[in-house]
Image (tube, rainbow, N blue to C red):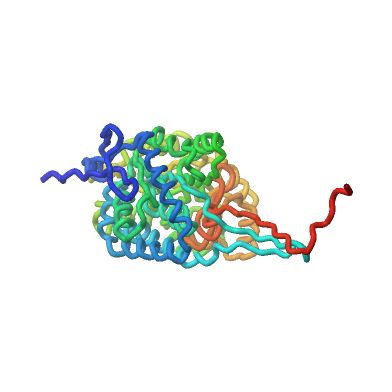
Amino acid sequence: MAQKLRKYGLFINGKEAPAKGGKTYIRENPATEVPFAEIAEAQKEDVDKAVKAATKAFETWSKLPVAERVKYIHKIAQALDKNREKIALTNTLETGKPIRESRLVEVGGSIKTLEYYAGISNQLNGESMSISEAQLSVTIKEPIGVVGHIIPWNFPLLLSFWKIAPALVAGCTIVLKPAEHTPCGISEVAKLCTKAGLPDGVLNIVPGDGAVAGQALVEHPGIAKVAFTGSTQVGKIVMKTAADTIKRVSLELGGKAPCIVFDDVDIDNCIEATLRGGFFNQGENCTAVTRLLLHEKIYDNFLSKFIKRVKKIKMGDPLKDDTEIGAVISKEHFETVKSYFQKGKNEGGKVLSGGKRPTKFKKGYFFEPTVLGNVDPKATIAREEIFGPIVAVIPFKTEAQAVRIANDTVYGLAGGIWTQDIKRALRVAKSINAGYLWVNTYGGIVPETPYGGHKQSGIGKELGKDGLNMYLESKTVNIFIGDKIPAFYKC
């Protein structure tokens, strides 16, 4: 029996609505290749309508006491928790990721992010400074205005709430453009927010093509800040476009994370974390371990154990609770991942595991967890972001060589260091040019910690107090408290 096609409209000013001209597109389930949703495709006029709704809502939302805004945030978190299974199901249907990841990481992580920002809402205070006996200076923190959020497809719910939560606490209103592949879950969440009492116009969703809806959002003069997560290539376009109206921009872009493993590690613990680092979310993760640097003394022993574990990762139906790796996002991306694997082979990488669609899958964009050994640091798969389940293994001899390889990239988002020598761990951490590092573990970005990249991995931060400050403007008020203004002119 054919599954009924779901239908999703735009979500503007608290209501679902069709796009201008009734334009829609179809999204398929990447694990089955069966269409499951018809989605309204926002046009420039729709984006303008959403910005106007958000602008009107900002007039009242920004003036609410922060304690009142926090009440709404708690209600949204409760609504997500109550509807966890429904939202997780939609998330898995549109992403192809295992249902357990949708529950724990996407929905669970979104709830944690909302709760964290509700908890630090009392830190919106400015400062007062006594400049002299006659002058007092006060800084005031104010919401920046209407913000545009552009979300990628790999974590469509979690990355939405990394932006939504601090924006709401700060007093901003939002127009959010989800990725073309993954608009369904956040559209359902927007409806839940309205049911939870969030005022109309505070959160608006405009799915559609990036070159149309995304471009219109970045260009719009009513948008004060753009928060974009996606590829470095598109991030450059966003930055250039935003410059025309001098918008504040935060960009979380691509990565090519190195994981440096020295010869004094606990190999079993390292393998456990590195498996997750390399293959979590099908490798569709900008902090994924795509460059595994192994000290030559442990290279063979580590890989022998690592490959045995890789081959035991259970790939299967994303809707089953015991599935550990699902399908990549689309046919186009499947072909991209496959082409990178072929380049890796052609450039001298030794195939140790994977490299194809498993024969048991006749449908769906499934790509085996793949490992290539003895990869040249200059090879394509060691330099370009693959965004798939491929780990390139690179041997090294010395600490200096490992650091040099790790930093030899245009990216600087994340990385890992494995050693029992704490001095070496700190020394290498200070030498690695990246914004987020793990030592003797890998993976897991928590709301309490600021996250963002160096070099072409982006600008600005998300999460932590830094993430909240991205949505606030500082205003300085200087107050003369003396008896008489000192004379400046002699006339």
Residue 129 lies, with reference to residue 381, above or below; the image says below
Residue in the image at 53% along x and 44% along y? 249
Let me know if residue 326 appears in the view.
no
Asked whether 93 or 308 is in front, the reply is 93
Q: Position of residue 284 (x, y in %)?
A: 40, 47
Q: Is residue 300 left or right of residue 353?
A: right
Asked whether 62 or 306 is in front, the reply is 62
Q: Residue furthest right?
A: 490
Q: Is residue 405 left or right of residue 48?
A: right
Q: Position of residue 469 (x, y in %)?
A: 55, 56
Q: Position of residue 339 (x, y in %)?
A: 39, 35
Q: How many marks?
A: 0
Residue in the image at 63% along x and 53% along y? 399
Q: Position of residue 200 (x, y in %)?
A: 35, 52
Task: Please tell me in which quadrant of the rendered image residue 350 appears.
Answer: top left
Task: Please tell me in which quadrant of the rendered image residue 103 appears.
Answer: bottom left
Asked whether 276 or 345 is in front, the reply is 276
